[in-house]
Every structure is written in structure tokens, then in C-alpha cells.
């Protein structure tokens, strides 16, 4: 007999079926999918270019959308706001003119999927009004636009880093458990050395070593590689223990008997039997990667301005005065918290669905 995946339903169906019975896990899955789609189509959903500055709209509060005017029900509109207190950044609406919110408007050019030039945005208003649904930052940049583009960076670093670290963990753990002996000892001792290094301090040390002239793309790749390198050891230890028992199963012995190579047996027969645990562990590891990237960017050691990430958008929140006058600056932190909670709920749901020890 091979794994339960071949005898019963597929792993995907099993996961979806289990998540439907786990309310918070099911809700978390849809929120994460919505967030991923929103970041993929960030250019279309964002009303403005995330790098576009407007110093006359510094710390502009979230605009209020109106549906009723003096004549009754009206198409959604906003008023233009003007600065009345430059010290405390207090704005007042100019109610003499309405600005209707348009759909599928033309504005700044972006590249759909990074390839196709496009200038159509989901919504927008005519100048000089600005539809800041979540307010603006110090430089008058739209926080909603930067939040969507920043999600691309924070989520992609986390997902790509987790994927690479789990590939390393599966391979190292599979080889150590299958071959045993000195190979097992060497790989596990090496993994223990990696686990003994505090990840955040390693990142800080490496960032200090590399030149400050690194571009944001180079910093992005550096963070992905470092997070992947320090994240594989924990999984490798668990996979190694699972492989020690799986390699003695009948189907592995049969594969050896027909002359299959060691790597083929590991990749085709042994590691697939660890998928249920691997998927659960992968999902639960994403929040740690999100926090690491956000912490580095918050400390100005990760993604640098003007490129947005959820972490560096929170840098302005270090000032109590800014928090008092513009509390909407904390919105990226709210999205970090919600995303981490959703990944934890999703991991719990997948554990209940795929781990037989948690099934009723």
C-alpha cells in the first residue's frame, strides 16, 4: 500500500473538506486569497501611484464618502479638503463643489502582472480632490495604494522564503533520515548550529556587513535567501524522524527491490508521505517570516524608501506626535496582525483536516 493520498481522496480535497468544517480556518483561507489577489492587481485597485508625492496633502485624513446631498440620494462623491492648521495637520472640506467618484478612470501608468502597461484604475476623482480612503503619509502619498504595493513585498518575501526553506528542510531531513549514519549526524549537527543562531541578529549582522548602496531589489533577495537559510533546520529535524519510520514501509522496500535509485525513492516514495505535516508546518511558519521582514523594514534595515513594505510604512509610527495627529499611519500594522492571525487560523484548520491525531 502507498500513502493514504492514493487510497482515499486527494490531499487537496481532504484539506478543503476539513477546512469547511473549521469556521475560522475557512474564513482565513478566503481572506488570504483575497489579500493575495488584491496585491497581484494592486495597480488596478490603487487609485494613485504609490510613489506620487503631494506635499500639500501631508497626513491627510481618510476622506468621507457621501451618498446624500441637499437633493437627496446622490452618486458617491467627496469634497476637496484644504489645510487649515499646518502644525497639527487639520483639514476642512470645501463644500462648494462635489467630486463624483468615477469607476475605471485613467490615471498613472502601471504594469499589469509586471508586463502589460496599463493606466486604468478601479476608481478615482478629478483633481484637485484626492480620494484618500485610508489617508496619506508625511509626503502626501496614498496609504491604500502603498498598502497594496507593500503587501506584494511583505507577502512575497514570506511565501518565497518559506517555500525555499521548506524545500531545503525536506531534502536535508529526507537524506538524513534515509541514509542515517555519518550523513545523519553531519546534517543534524549542522542544522542544530543553524538553529542556535538568533535569526533577527543574523539578519542585522549581515545587513551591517553588506554595503549601504544595495538597491531594494538586492535587499529583497538578501532577505529571502537569509530567511530561507535559517528557517530549514527545524523542519529537517521533524522530517528526519518521519523518514526513519517511513523508509521501513513495504512500498519503500518494494522500490528498492526493483532497483530504484536512492534519490528517486526519497523524492517519489518517502517525502510525499510527509506532505500533510509539511503543509501544516509551512502555513504556520509564514507569520514568522512576515514579522522578520516587517521588523527589518521597520528598523530601516530592510526594504528602503520610497519602495513600500508593511514594515517601513510603520516607521513613521515611532513618533508619538504623528500617532496623535495621524493615527491611520498604524493601518499597515493592523494588516500585519490580521494576516498573521489568518495564517495561524489556516494552519490550525489544516492540522485538524490533515493530521489524523486531531480528527474525531
Image (cartoon, rainbow, N blue to C red):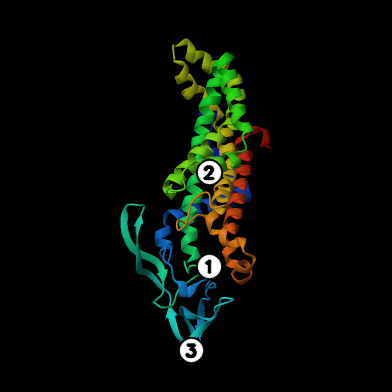
For label 1, the SS is loop
Q: Which of marks 3 and 2 is in front?
A: 2
Work out whether mark 3 precedes mark 1 in sequence or the reverse, and give the earlier one: 3
- Check disc 3 and report the residue beneath it: 71
Left of 346 or right of it: where is 107?
A: left
At label 2, counting other C-alpha atoms closer than 10 Å, the crowd grade (few under 14, some 14-19, many 20 or more) is few
Secondary structure at badge 3 equals: loop
- Label 3 to label 1: alpha-carbon separation: 28 Å
Q: Is the Cβ of the residue at disc 3 closer than 8 Å to that at disc 2? A: no
Mark 3 vs mark 1: in front: 1
Nearer to the camera, 334 or 314: 314
Mark pair 2, 1: CA separation: 34 Å
User: Vertically, is 83 above or below 227?
Assistant: below
Which residue corresponds to mark 1?
134
Taking the image as shown, residue 78 lies to the left or right of residue 359, namely left
Against 279, residue 185 (above or below) is above
Amino acid at each position: 500500500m502507498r500513502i493514504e493520498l492514493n487510497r482515499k481522496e486527494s490531499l487537496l480535497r481532504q484539506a478543503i473538506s476539513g477546512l469547511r468544517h473549521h469556521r475560522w480556518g475557512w474564513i482565513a483561507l478566503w481572506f488570504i486569497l483575497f489579500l493575495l489577489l488584491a496585491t497581484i492587481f494592486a495597480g488596478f485597485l490603487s487609485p494613485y501611484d504609490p510613489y506620487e508625492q503631494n506635499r500639500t496633502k501631508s497626513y491627510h485624513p481618510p476622506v468621507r464618502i457621501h451618498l446624500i446631498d441637499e437633493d437627496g440620494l446622490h452618486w458617491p462623491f467627496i469634497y476637496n479638503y484644504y489645510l487649515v492648521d499646518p502644525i497639527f495637520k487639520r483639514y476642512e472640506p470645501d463644500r462648494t463643489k462635489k467630486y463624483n467618484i468615477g469607476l475605471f478612470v485613467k490615471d498613472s501608468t502601471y504594469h499589469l502582472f509586471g508586463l502589460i502597461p496599463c493606466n486604468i484604475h478601479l476608481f478615482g476623482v478629478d483633481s484637485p480632490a484626492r480620494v484618500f480612503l485610508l489617508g496619506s503619509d508625511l509626503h502626501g502619498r496614498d496609504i491604500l495604494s502603498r498598502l497594496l504595493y507593500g503587501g506584494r513585498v511583505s507577502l512575497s518575501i514570506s511565501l518565497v522564503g518559506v517555500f525555499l526553506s521548506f524545500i531545503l528542510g525536506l531534502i536535508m531531513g529526507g537524506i538524513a533520515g534515509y541514509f542515517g549514519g555519518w550523513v545523519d549526524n553531519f546534517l543534524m549537527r549542522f542544522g542544530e548550529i543553524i538553529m542556535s543562531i538568533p535569526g533577527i541578529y543574523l539578519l542585522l549582522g549581515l545587513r551591517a556587513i553588506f554595503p549601504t548602496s544595495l538597491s531594494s531589489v538586492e535587499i529583497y533577495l538578501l532577505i529571502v535567501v537569509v530567511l530561507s537559510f535559517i528557517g530549514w533546520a527545524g523542519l529537517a529535524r521533524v522530517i528526519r524522524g518521519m523518514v526513519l519510520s517511513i523508509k521501513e514501509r513495504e512500498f519503500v522496500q518494494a522500490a528498492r527491490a526493483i532497483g530504484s535509485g536512492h534519490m528517486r525513492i526519497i523524492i517519489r516514495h518517502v517525502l510525499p508521505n510527509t506532505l500533510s505535516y509539511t503543509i501544516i508546518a509551512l502555513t504556520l511558519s509564514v507569520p514568522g517570516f512576515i514579522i522578520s521582514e516587517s521588523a527589518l523594514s521597520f528598523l530601516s534595515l530592510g526594504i528602503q524608501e520610497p519602495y513600500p513594505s508593511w514594515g517601513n510604512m510603520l516607521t513613521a509610527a515611532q513618533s508619538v506626535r504623528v500617532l496623535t495627529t495621524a493615527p491611520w499611519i498604524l493601518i499597515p500594522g493592523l494588516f500585519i496582525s490580521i494576516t498573521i492571525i489568518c495564517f495561524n487560523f489556516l494552519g490550525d484548520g489544516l492540522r485538524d483536516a490533515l493530521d489524523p491525531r486531531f480528527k474525531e
